[in-house]
Amino acid sequence: MKINNLEQLNEMHIDVLKEIGNIGAGNAATSLSEMLNLPVDMSVPKVKILDIKDAGSLLGGPENVMVGILAKFIGDIEGIMMFLIEEKFVGDIIEKLMGEHVSFLKGLSEMELSAVSEIGNILTASYINAISSLTGLNINISVPAVAVDMVGALLAVPAIELSPASDQIIFIEGVLLDLDQSVSSNILLVPTLESLNIMMTRLGIEL
């Protein structure tokens, strides 16, 4: 029996996704810590399966401004991944990296956008490498696209990618910590159903 929709995922499947999220979070924290030369940690993530229209309320409402980092993954499996991070935290990272204080991320310079893109590269690669290491699958990721906008606008992008196949996403909710603050770091993981079946089979999980 194959997984035909995300509602079929049982507790064992969720545990697998949690483990992927946990390893990806650890990798991302290590890479960010090295980049910033500061201690960075991430909490054990929570994994939820939900309709994309319900994700907005978990992200502070459709008008909440966040930074969205979107990347596609291709190879043995395919899909998209979007990180949604609080605007202030990304601004703090830019300040620590470049010594430039920014109050609002809209209107960033080319160099500042490049720094945000590098953060996106680190985060997306950390999670894709976790999936690749656990499954032995060959996976490549695109250069991440970065946008600063209201949550409602950011979620429209994966919603278009999903339609008409499904309205559901895998929502990985974590908390990223540094010396000064704790910040929510949320991931929308949207593999194709065929790719999800391949991942679970590779991990020896009964479908």
Image (cartoon, helix red, strand yellow):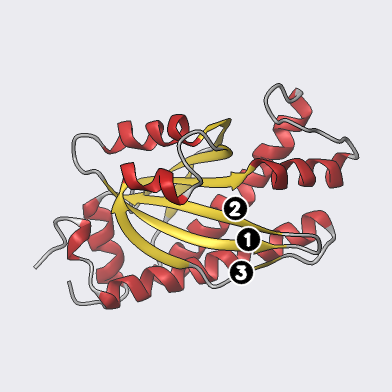
Tell me the quarter of the image containing the N terminus. Answer: bottom left
Alpha-carbon neighbours of circle 1 within 10 Å: few (<14), some, or many (≥20)?
many
Q: Which residue is mark 3?
A: 26
Q: Are marks 1 and 3 in contact (CB under 8 Å)?
A: yes
Q: Name the residue type under label 3.
A: Gly
Q: Is residue 41 above or below residue 89?
A: below
Determine the CA span between mark 1 and mark 2: 5 Å
Q: Which mark is residue 87?
A: none
Looking at the rendering, which quadrant does residue 196 occupy?
bottom left
- Classify mark 1: helix, strand or loop: helix
Count of marks, rendered view: 3
- Can I make out residue 73 in this image? no
- Can I make out residue 189 in this image? yes
Q: Which residue is mark 1?
A: 28
Alpha-carbon neighbours of circle 2 within 10 Å: few (<14), some, or many (≥20)?
many
Looking at the rendering, which quadrant does residue 10 occupy?
bottom left
Residue nearest the observer in this picture, 81 or 7: 7
Q: Are marks 1 and 2 in contact (CB under 8 Å)?
A: yes
Alpha-carbon neighbours of circle 3 within 10 Å: few (<14), some, or many (≥20)?
many
Q: Name the residue type under label 2.
A: Leu
| Relative to 205, 99 lies left or right | right
Q: Is residue 182 above or below residue 10?
A: above
Looking at the rendering, which quadrant does residue 120 occupy?
top right
Q: Which residue is mark 2?
A: 123
